[in-house]
Amino acid sequence: MDNSAIPLAEIEAALHAGELCFHYQPKISFHSGRIVGGEALLRWKKSDGSLVPPGLFLPQCEESGFITDITAVMVNELVQDIARLRALKPDIQIAFNVSALDLLSPYLVKMLRSYIGNQIISPGNIQIEITETAIVHQSGRIHATLLDLVALGVEIVMDDFGTGYSSLDALSQLPFSSLKIDQGVVGRMSEDPKNTHIVRSSLKMARDMNIKTIAEGIENETVYAFLLASGCSEAQGFWMARPQPIESFIQVLKDDPSWPSCELGFLYNAWSNHLAYRRKVLDTVYTMTMTRPEEWVNLPKMDLRHHAAYCRLGQWYRDMEKAGFSERVYKRLKDLHNQMHVAGDALIKTVKAQPDHEAIIEASNAFLQLSEQVDQEVSRIVALSFAEGLRENFSRADDEDDARNELPRFSRFS
Ligand code: C2E
Ligand code: MG
Ligand code: MG
């Protein structure tokens, strides 16, 4: 069947006959290995029971503008579905795809505001996915709609990241809370190292920008494990679960299956963010000592915030703390890390006060020494956890001692 085989009038009739519905593809958290939500994907269920995928009827709807009618009708369906899913999992996050046309008028915001106002769903239950190509010619109107959605508490996800030309620009200009790495890029990692590089750098960049990452198109266990180790936040793909009708999605939620999860990738990412802090401090010191104080107004802005809580490494052990892991694992790291960030602040202040160079050398040495100790401590935790993960993976975990039992569950492949 090609696109021209489905005239718009037929699609209009299908919409009004209630033949359009959503299938839901589960999304899994790499932190917990459990389902945190799903993506709603449009399907046309014909009266003969056959299913038409969106790729065969959405392009002509986009072209004609009929897509906004579809969205307006289907948002109601979506909200009803979410209300059912919430009964099982109140914090479920369902992603919904919208087109640029949907964002050009305020109707979507109005509808969602009313559902949220009436407490049928909560803002955390819904995420809006838009592709970067949809917003390539981003208008002020689209930007305003996205801001309205964010003000409502709805998260915005950039879909198909890595396929377009404007991703980075759009990412920095618009209020995205997550980026979803395109399934093509994810799938081609096994064929071409460039794709692996795109995926890894996207994960790192997102982490530095404090936004979540979702990988779609995970079709096998190896790609899953690789993304887990790389510190991606959420997973979606045929290997874990296919898009399915609401009834079977409900059953899956009830069954509450689990997939491998681990903390190692998150720790690596947190560490690399922490190394970026050290680099920023040292680059700033170097630039300032090379230039005259009256020129310092021209220093490039680097978002240099010293408190350890702003560093991803600080956030990592806070997350561990919140998740109830024993402080024994990360207490030393926490202390050294706090001291190092205090030393970073002191170093910049010393340079600004322009004392003699001896004072600056002393402050930099203190900073660098602590930094080395933090690195050693991270390496220690990584080594311990890596060993623990290997033992677990090879099912030889029957002689665990107390300390290892208290480690974050770095690996759950069993
Ligand atoms: P998308 O938003 O990027 O959705 C992901 C697509 O990848 C889905 O195709 C899903 O079935 C497919 N997929 C998921 N995991 C795998 C995997 O492991 N391997 C492979 N090969 N594919 C996988 P689907 O359902 O055919 O949707 C295609 C596109 O249609 C969507 O891409 C989205 O752009 C659009 N779409 C779907 N539903 C809606 C909707 O309600 N509104 C709008 N405006 N667009 C929609
Ligand atoms: Mg999508
Ligand atoms: Mg996509």
Image (cartoon, rainbow, N blue to C red):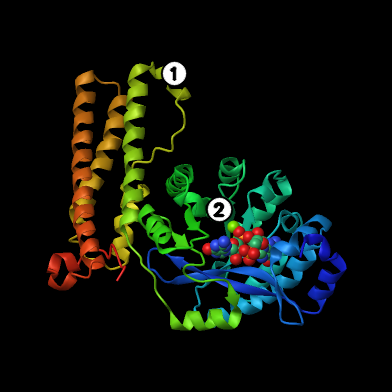
- Image position, residue 344 (x, y; %): 28, 36
Which numbered marker is on residue 184?
2
Taking depth in this image into account, of 239 and 327 the one nearest to the observer is 239
Amino acid on which disc 1 is placed: Glu
- Image position, residue 305 (x, y; %): 38, 41
Q: Residues within 10 Å of mark 1 (few under 14, many from 20)?
A: few
> Within the displayed image, which quadrant is ligand 3 positioned in?
bottom right
Measuring 22% from the left and 34% from the top, which residue is drawn there? 368
Q: Is mark 2 within 8 Å of ligand 1?
A: no
Drawn side of residue 360 relative to residue 198, left or right: left
- Image position, residue 235 (x, y; %): 47, 62
Quarter residue 120 falls in = bottom right
Q: Is mark 1 within 8 Å of ligand 3?
A: no
Drawn side of residue 62 relative to residue 268, left or right: right
Reply above or below: 140 against 127: above
Taking depth in this image into account, of 264 and 196 the one nearest to the observer is 196
